[in-house]
Image (tube, rainbow, N blue to C red):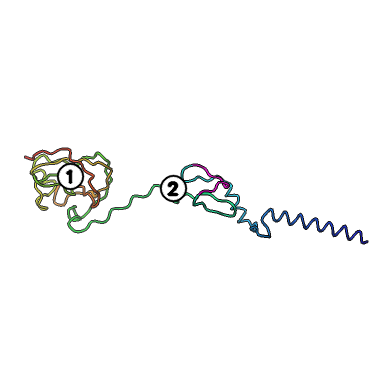
Amino acid sequence: MKRLWFVIAWLCLVVITFGRADAMAHGVGGSGTPTTKSNQSYHATAQLPLRAAGGAERGASDPAPGALRIGRSSWQVAPLTQGFVAAESALPKLTGSFADSFAGGSYTTQTFKAGTTFYRAEGTDQGIGSFFGLAKPSTAADAEKMYNLAKWNNGADVVSTYRLTQDTTMYVGDVAGGTGQQALLPRGSGNVFQQVGREPLP
C-alpha cells in the first residue's frame, strides 16, 4: 500500500513539473505575460514583415530606432501619411476690392500649369501687379473694354506677356465692368511669373 502511494506521489510530481515548464514556455505564470487571445493576435501580427520608412521590409526580430514594442517583438511604425497625397488647401475667400473686381463678386480657383501664358495691359512705368488677363488685347481701347482698367487707375500704354514658371493656383473669373476674364495671383505666391514679351498698344 505504501508503495502504491509512493508511485502516485511520484507521478503527480512529474505531471506538475512538466506542466509548469510548459506553462512558462508559453508565457503563463511567473514573470511571463499571460497568453490571451489578444496577446496571441499581437504575436501573430509581429511575425509579419512590415515595411520600414526606407522601403525595406523589417521582421519581428529586427528592431529599429523609434520602433513600437509589443511583448518581445518590435518594428518600425510608418508615418500615418505615408502612401497618401496631401489634399490641396483651399485659397482664402476674397473680400473688399479684390472680390469686387470680379463680376458679381463671383470667381473660382484653378491651378494653372507651368508655361501658361497671361497678359497685362500696363502703363509704361507700371510694374507687374497681381491681376492677369487670359486674352491679349490688340489696342488700348480693346484693353479698356476687356479689363476695365480706368476704374482701377491702370494704364494701357503697353501689353506685357507673362509666363508661369511653376504650377500655381489662382482666383479666376469674369472682369467686373469688362468683357474679359482675369486671374488673380494670391498673396504670398512669390515670383512665379517671367516676363517674356512687351509691345506698345496703339
The answer to which of 47 and 65 lies nearer the viewer is 65
Other residues around mark 2 within 10 Å, as few (<14) / some (14–19) / many (≥20): few
Is 74 left or right of 53, judged from the image as shown?
Answer: right
Label placed on residue 37: none
Q: Indicate the position of residue 75 as horizontal and vertical percent values.
A: 53, 49
- Name the one closer to the observer, 16 or 202: 16
The vertical placement of 139 against 104, above or below, is above
Identity of the residue drawn at 68% across and 60% down: 30
Closer mark to the observer between disc 2 and disc 1: 2
- The amino acid at mark 2 is Gln
Disc marking residue 82: 2
Question: Residue at 18% across / 48% down in the picture?
Answer: 131
Say which amino acid is labelled 1: Gly
Q: As drawn, which residue projects farthest toward the right? A: 1
Determine the residue positioned at 92% across, 61% down. 2
Q: Residue furthest left?
A: 202
Classify residue 173 as left or right of residue 41: left
Name the residue beneath numbered marker 1: 133
* Number of other residues with Cα within 10 Å of mark 1, as a class: few under 14, some 14 to 19, many 20 or more: many
SS for dot 1:
strand
